[in-house]
Amino acid sequence: MRAYQNVLPQIKALGAVLLAISPQTADKSQATLLKNFLQYEVLSDVGNHVARQFGLVYPLNAEVRRIYLGFGVNLAEYNGDESWELPLPGSFIVDRSMTVRFSFVDADYTRRLEPATIIETLRTLGGEGGVP
Amino acid sequence: MNGDQTRLTFELQKELDAMRQEYLALTPPDIAETFRKAAEELVLSGIEERSLKVGQRVPDFVLPNAVGRDIRLSAVTAGNTAVISFYRGAW
């Protein structure tokens, strides 16, 4: 998430607002913000309701849960529910008519959209006149 | 400006790949194998194909921010383009 902080001035300059969404409780999100000096909205989607509407939610299997717990990561506590579900990392650019103009979703969750690609895409969309 | 952009490109993936190498070096093989299998199952589940696509409408939502203030997507998009990024959490 720190990588996005670096391009935040450019995102703002292109007339866009960055919203980060995670299933963490608001308290945990605040800790993340403070720890990483993030200056954008980090929204708390407890229960993954919004992520589900984006088609991104999956459950961790029992074996993976055991390993997480062994690492001291109790997702039930971080996320405030017992579901052990997570959203697939994904990024979307949404225009004023609430239509997806760009999406990046990769089931290999070690991959992420390069922030530079967001900037390029915003610039291209702006150039088309479709997104101010 | 262009120089900055070039530097930014692929920086994140490089950092993540380096973290991955470090993780593989530190993680017992059986645990790494469990994660590898789970990741493979996730790809095979077709989740990627089921996600929202370009041209589709996003359902409006209201979610609390880090200080508990409600943020409504349609209020954001009324004046701005929104960049929405889902992440798993910081743990």
Image (cartoon, helix red, strand yellow):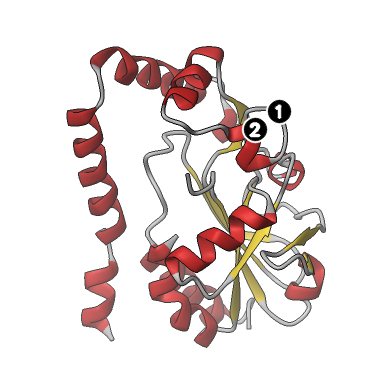
Residue B10 lies in what quarter of the image? bottom left
Q: Position of residue A17 (x, y in %)?
A: 61, 75
Residue B66 lies in what quarter of the image? bottom right
Q: Position of residue A52 (x, y in %)?
A: 72, 39
Give the labeled residue for mark 1: A82
Q: Read off the chain for label 1.
A: A
Asked whether A131 or A112 is in front, the reply is A112
Point out the image quarter for the N terminus of chain A: bottom left
When the figure is inspected, residue B20 is found, relative to residue B28, above or below; the finding is below
Q: What amino acid is at disc 2?
A: Ala
Could you tell me if residue A128 is visible in this image?
A: yes
Identify the secondary structure beneath mark 1.
Answer: loop
Could you tell me if residue A56 is visible in this image?
A: no
Asked whether B12 or B65 is in front, the reply is B65
When the figure is inspected, residue B46 is found, relative to residue A13, above or below; the finding is above
Whether labels 2 and 1 share one chain: yes
Give the labeled residue for mark 2: A76
Q: Position of residue B19 (x, y in %)?
A: 25, 44
Tell me if label 2 and label 1 are in contact, CB under 8 Å.
yes
Point out the image quarter for the C terminus of chain A: bottom right
Say whether residue B37 is left or right of residue B84.
left
When the figure is inspected, residue A37 is found, relative to residue B14, above or below; the finding is below
Q: What amino acid is at disc 1?
A: Glu
Q: Read off the chain for label 2.
A: A
Question: Going 37% across and 59% down the picture, which residue do you hit?
Answer: A114
Say whether residue B21 is left or right of residue B49.
left
* Mark 1 nearby-residue class (10 Å; few <14, some 14–19, many ≥20): few
Identify the secondary structure beneath mark 2.
Answer: helix
